[in-house]
Amino acid sequence: MQNLPRIFEDGFEIGDVSKWTGTRTTVGETVAVDSFSALLGSFGLRSISSNAGPDEYAMVRQAVVGLTTVYARGYFRVNAGLPLPADNDRLNLIIYPYACNVAIGRTAGITQFQLRVWNAVTNSWSITNTGIIPSLNQIYCIEIAYIANQLAQVYLNGTLIAEQNLVAVNNVVINDVYFGLAMTATAGHALD
């Protein structure tokens, strides 16, 4: 997957989000570029949610043109808010709308990395729990690959941790990619 043509790249080193198509924020959430959030280089994206609930967004968006095969990589660090307080709470990190996303979610009392795939046949999410528990203030390289009507995969620090077969369940064309923080969590639970 990593050998696909590169159509967009940004390390936020210009100090803002002007390379991106736009941002998506809800009331009480912020997206900013600052030196505190630098993971590689001098600047990084910082997404903060006050979580008035239930669905919050603090993300950057990149428009792409009708892709059926897409691969994205980002470096992420959660500064506060883990573990998540209740089952079904989640923090989405990279989203391909109506296709799939990589998240930190809580299932059966465990906050863990997840691959979430939209099943267009049943109109529901299919979740693959990895059992890998994220730590605060740890930098993770997260990659997600999507091939319409074939496969979705998530890699953590270069290792495949989750995949789902998409044959006959998802054939969505990707027009946007979101990075940052999108959460559905117990109201009042803040994340940084």
Image: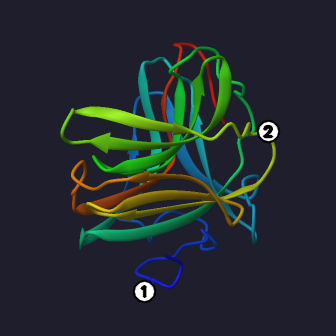
Q: Residue at x 60, y 68 (%)?
A: 12
Mark 1, other Cα within 10 Å: few <14 / some 14–19 / many ≥20: few
In the depicted structure, whether residue 138 falls above or below residue 39: above
Image position of 133 (left or right of 53)? right
Q: Nearer the viewer, residue 156 or 192?
A: 156
Q: Position of residue 98 (x, y in %)?
A: 27, 46
For the residues labelled 2 and 1, the Cα–Cα distance comes to: 32 Å
Find numbered disc 2 in the image and state the secondary structure of the residue it sits on.
loop
Q: Residue at x 52, y 21 (%)?
A: 185
The amino acid type found where label 1 is placed reads Pro
In the depicted structure, whether residue 68 falls above or below residue 88: below
Residue pointed to by mark 2: 135
Q: Nearer the viewer, residue 95 or 127?
A: 127
Mark 2, other Cα within 10 Å: few <14 / some 14–19 / many ≥20: some
Image position of 175 (left or right of 41)? left
Residue pointed to by mark 1: 5
Q: Residue at x 75, y 39 (%)?
A: 79
Label placed on residue 125: none
